[in-house]
């Protein structure tokens, strides 16, 4: 199966320029995707263009990753309802370095069709304003720029000259890579089509050359909510921003209506593998076979096998049978991530020095239960657990009960958790 057919069945092809298929059949071709350094981590929405580059490389073509040291100083207006805050240079450089390290996890940077990372600041830093408007601006008319959706959608509210000229800056990126790196294709989301065409137009007019555009659809969810968002915001690739547990859970909780679409886009599983998973899923929907396979695949590729095991173990603590040893084996960051949304209290370590009665801990010292009477009733019902172990009213809680010397996990029934920390 050739690249275009592969992207079509995976639902990853929105539009291509005529002649691209013939170009790809003729020779190994360089193609690039640009990433703006708006944060020090990519999020899962960025995985769509990353997967485009990965399929590009697997098909025998050369992927080029452009990190926007220059364009990040301007800000892309595409899909934005208001102007973005401009980044401090030091912050932007930190973001660029972080994103570069993440992108290296997905592509091969050696071999015949090795991937390369380029920074557009390297060629823009030596271009002055007058030179740019004379040598680049004269080739693109204002009417052409005004016709782009990224401009038209903002005319009523207004946009700065800085944002208006963004498409010229991105177009020049394409021209520079075409001229100096023999890069003939730019890829991106469907909202980038206008910006990419500005590049092909500049190559045609300024360089008398020919280049191509390829875009993927913008990812949407069946329920209308935004893909890649949770209650806490973006789902990030950096574990410091989104724990492996939360990352895994996001994919595991994808709706059935979206699971088939997402496993095609975000994994490298074959058509036969995916159809087999879907058939099994149809026989037993409650097992969430497609979602589990998707969550495992993406978690391993973005993080690691070890992180997947941690995420599965963390999920088991909340939704399955587990013991105190399972809690202690979790890295603290994952442990805190699992119980991020539960009620919490902090107590003094002195309280545990000579031991504190469980009834007093449950009520007076933490407020987990409203009164000593409620605590006694819950204990008589055998509904209270300390660090996953059933306990009775004779239990004295001591420092030795702390998880990793820092926390106590209280639980009433199956789902009502309370986290106690010591200072």
Image (spheres, grey):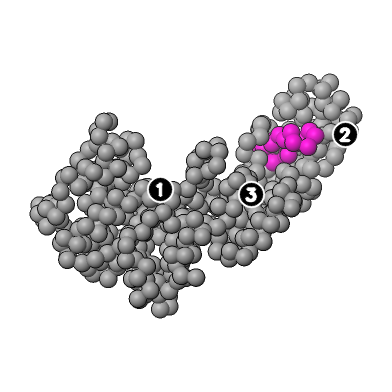
**Quarter of the picture holding the C terminus:** top right
Whichever of callouts 1 and 3 sits on the residue coming sooner in the sequence is 1
x and y percentages locating residue 208 in the rendered image: 17, 66
x and y percentages locating residue 39 in the rendered image: 40, 48
Residue lying at 25% horizontally and 49% vertically, measured from the top left:
167
Question: Depth check: 307 or 130 in front?
Answer: 130
User: Is residue 422 one of those drawn in magenta?
Assistant: yes
Q: Is residue 422 left or right of residue 61?
A: right
Q: Is residue 30 left or right of residue 258?
A: left
Residue lying at 77% horizontally and 29% vertically, measured from the top left:
362
For label 1, the crowd category at 10 Å Cα-Cα, with few meaning under 14, some 14 to 19 and many 20 or more, is: some
Circle 1 is placed at which residue position?
39
Q: Classify residue 360 by image quadrant.
A: top right
For label 2, the crowd category at 10 Å Cα-Cα, with few meaning under 14, some 14 to 19 and many 20 or more, is: some
Disc 1 element: loop
Residue lying at 22% horizontally and 38% vertically, measured from the top left:
160
Residue lying at 72% horizontally and 25% vertically, measured from the top left:
367
Disc 2 element: loop
Circle 3 is placed at which residue position?
252
Whichever of callouts 1 and 2 sits on the residue coming sooner in the sequence is 1
Q: Give the main secondary structure, helix, strand or loop, of the magenta stretch.
A: strand
Q: Which is in the foreground here, disc 3 or disc 2? A: 3
For label 3, the crowd category at 10 Å Cα-Cα, with few meaning under 14, some 14 to 19 and many 20 or more, is: some
Q: Are marks 1 and 2 in contact (CB under 8 Å)?
A: no
User: Is residue 350 one of those drawn in magenta?
Assistant: no
Q: Is residue 226 left or right of residue 17?
A: right
Q: Which mark is residue 382?
A: 2
Question: Depth check: 380 or 360 in front?
Answer: 380
Task: Provide the residue span drawn in magenta.
Answer: 407-423
> What is the CA distance from the residue labelled 1 to the residue labelled 3?
25 Å
């Amino acid at each position: 199966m050739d690249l275009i057919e592969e992207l079509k069945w995976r639902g990853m092809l929105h539009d291509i320029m005529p002649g691209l298929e013939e170009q790809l059949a003729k020779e190994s071709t360089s193609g690039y995707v640009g990433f703006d350094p708006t944060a020090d981590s990519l999020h899962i929405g960025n995985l769509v263009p990353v997967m485009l580059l990965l399929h590009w490389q697997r098909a025998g073509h050369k992927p080029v990753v452009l990190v926007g040291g220059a364009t990040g100083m301007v800000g892309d207006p595409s899909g934005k309802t208001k102007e973005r805050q401009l980044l401090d240079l030091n912050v932007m450089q930190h973001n660029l370095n972080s994103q570069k390290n993440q992108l290296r996890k997905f592509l091969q940077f050696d071999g015949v069709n090795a991937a390369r990372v380029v920074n557009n600041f390297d060629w823009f830093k030596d271009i002055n304003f007058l030179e740019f408007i004379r040598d680049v601006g004269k080739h693109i008319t204002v009417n052409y720029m005004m016709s782009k959706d990224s401009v038209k959608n903002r005319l009523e509210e207004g946009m700065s000259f800085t944002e208006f000229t963004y498409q010229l800056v991105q177009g020049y990126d394409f021209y520079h890579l075409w001229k100096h790196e023999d890069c003939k294709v730019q890829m991106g989301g469907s909202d980038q089509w206008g910006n990419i065409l500005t590049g092909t137009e500049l190559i045609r007019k300024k360089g008398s050359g020919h280049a191509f555009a390829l875009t993927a659809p913008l990812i949407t969810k069946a329920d209308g909510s935004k893909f890649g968002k949770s209650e806490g915001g973006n789902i990030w690739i950096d574990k410091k921003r989104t724990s492996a547990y939360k990352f895994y859970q996001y994919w595991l909780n994808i709706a059935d209506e979206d699971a088939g679409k997402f496993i095609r886009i975000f994994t490298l599983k074959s058509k036969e593998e995916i159809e087999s998973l879907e058939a099994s899923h149809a026989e037993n929907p409650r097992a969430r076979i497609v979602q589990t396979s998707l969550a495992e695949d993406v978690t391993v590729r973005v993080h690691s096998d070890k992180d997947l095991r941690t995420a599965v173990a963390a999920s088991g603590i909340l939704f399955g049978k587990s013991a105190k040893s399972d809690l202690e084996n979790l890295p603290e960051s994952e442990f805190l991530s699992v119980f991020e949304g539960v009620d919490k209290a902090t107590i003094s370590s002195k309280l545990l020095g000579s031991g504190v009665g469980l009834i007093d801990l449950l009520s007076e010292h933490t407020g987990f239960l409203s009164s000593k009477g409620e605590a006694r009733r819950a204990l008589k019902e055998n509904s209270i657990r300390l660090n996953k172990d059933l306990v009775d009213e004779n239990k004295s809680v001591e420092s030795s009960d702390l998880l990793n010397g820092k926390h106590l996990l209280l639980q009433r029934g199956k789902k009502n958790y309370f986290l106690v920390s010591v200072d």
